[in-house]
Image (spheres, rainbow, N blue to C red):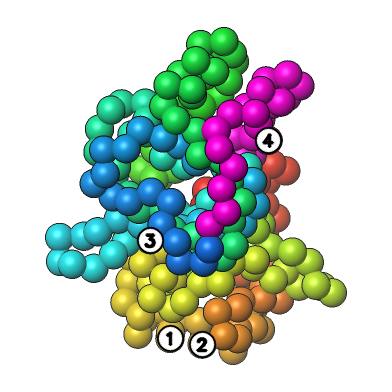
């Protein structure tokens, strides 16, 4: 799935880039906080951000990863409801903070951009529903393999014959993404390493065999021509 900015072209893209105030966010800085009633969106130009939400048991669920070109905070800006998640910088981020009124004026002027934004919200919801169904029937190892193969396709950069996932994720964050415990994720990572599919270091994961990882995830060996970028 291409980013919001990646789907805009010509004058529409140029006008979108003129909106808002340019900001720099440091690692672990919060862009958007769950429960806030703020009404702005953030357009990421570079870097990665994680989207998290608090659970009733006090733990935190990692919902998604967003990258340069993505827009975050659009749901609360569009429906006037409290923020449903927190967005935190995973590293250095360059972004534009766009106020609700400015976004609304832009979307009225560019109906195709409004349709694009609405379509992306629908895609995110559809992906979340599909993920819940899939994960209900998959063991943790297959869930982890699916998450890592998707991240490798969407955010990996080639090094020799492997793909280094360009996001630093801890084991607790991987556990949150797969809906499992840290102990189970640790075991699944070890098994995938032993099978020669992955290499891991401190907050670094390298996919050595993408086709094999996709088979472990119960996916076709080859990704679709236009791979979905769910995170």
Residue drawn at the location 41% of the way across and 63% of the way down: 177
Q: Which residue is mark 3?
A: 62
Q: Is residue 23 magenta?
A: yes
- Give the distance between the C-alpha atoms of the residues marked 2 and 1, in whole angstroms: 5 Å
Q: Does 121 appear above or below 192?
A: above
Residue drawn at the location 64% of the way across and 83% of the way down? 199
Sequence order check: which comes first, mark 3 or mark 1?
Answer: 3
* Residue 112 image point, x, y percent: 59, 15
Q: Which mark is residue 6?
A: 4
> Mark 4 Cα within 10 Å, few/some/many (few <14, many 20+)?
few
Secondary structure beneath dot 1 equals: helix
| Residue ID at (68%, 35%) | 6
Residue numbers of the magenta segment: 2-25
Q: Look at the image and say whether residue 108 sits in the magenta stretch.
A: no
Q: Position of residue 72 (x, y in %)?
A: 47, 42
Q: State how far apart marks 3 and 1 are (Cα).
A: 20 Å
Q: What whole-number distance in Å separates the C-alpha atoms at marks 2 and 4?
A: 36 Å
Q: Earlier in the sequence, mark 3 or mark 4?
A: 4
Q: Which residue is mark 2?
A: 190
Label 2 vs 4, first from the N-terminus:
4
Tag in front: 4 or 1: 4
Is label 2 in a helix, a strand or a loop?
A: helix
Residue under pointer 1? 187
Tell which circle, 3 or 2, labels the residue nearer the N-terminal end: 3
Q: Are marks 2 and 1 in contact (CB under 8 Å)?
A: yes
Closer to viewer: mark 3 or mark 1 = 3
């Amino acid at each position: 799935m291409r980013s919001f900015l990646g789907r805009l072209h010509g004058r529409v893209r140029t006008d979108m880039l003129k909106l808002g105030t340019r900001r720099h966010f440091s690692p672990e800085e919060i862009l958007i906080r769950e429960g806030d009633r703020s009404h702005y969106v953030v357009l990421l130009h570079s870097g990665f951000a994680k989207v998290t939400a608090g659970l009733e048991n006090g733990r935190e669920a990692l919902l998604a990863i967003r990258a340069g070109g993505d827009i975050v905070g659009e749901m609360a800006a569009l429906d006037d409801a409290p923020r449903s998640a927190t967005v935190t910088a995973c590293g250095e981020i360059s972004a534009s903070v766009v106020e609700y009124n400015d976004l609304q004026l832009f979307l009225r002027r560019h109906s195709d951009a409004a349709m694009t934004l609405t379509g992306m919200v629908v895609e995110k919801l559809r992906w979340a529903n599909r993920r819940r169904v899939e994960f209900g029937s998959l063991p943790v190892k297959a869930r982890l393999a699916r998450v890592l193969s998707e991240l490798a396709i969407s955010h990996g950069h080639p090094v020799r014959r492997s793909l280094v996932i360009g996001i630093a994720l801890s084991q607790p964050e991987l556990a949150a993404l797969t809906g499992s415990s840290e102990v189970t994720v640790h075991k699944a990572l070890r098994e995938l390493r032993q099978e020669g599919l992955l290499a891991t270091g401190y907050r670094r994961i390298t996919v050595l065999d993408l086709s094999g990882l996709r088979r472990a995830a119960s996916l076709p060996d080859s990704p679709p021509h236009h791979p979905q970028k769910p995170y």
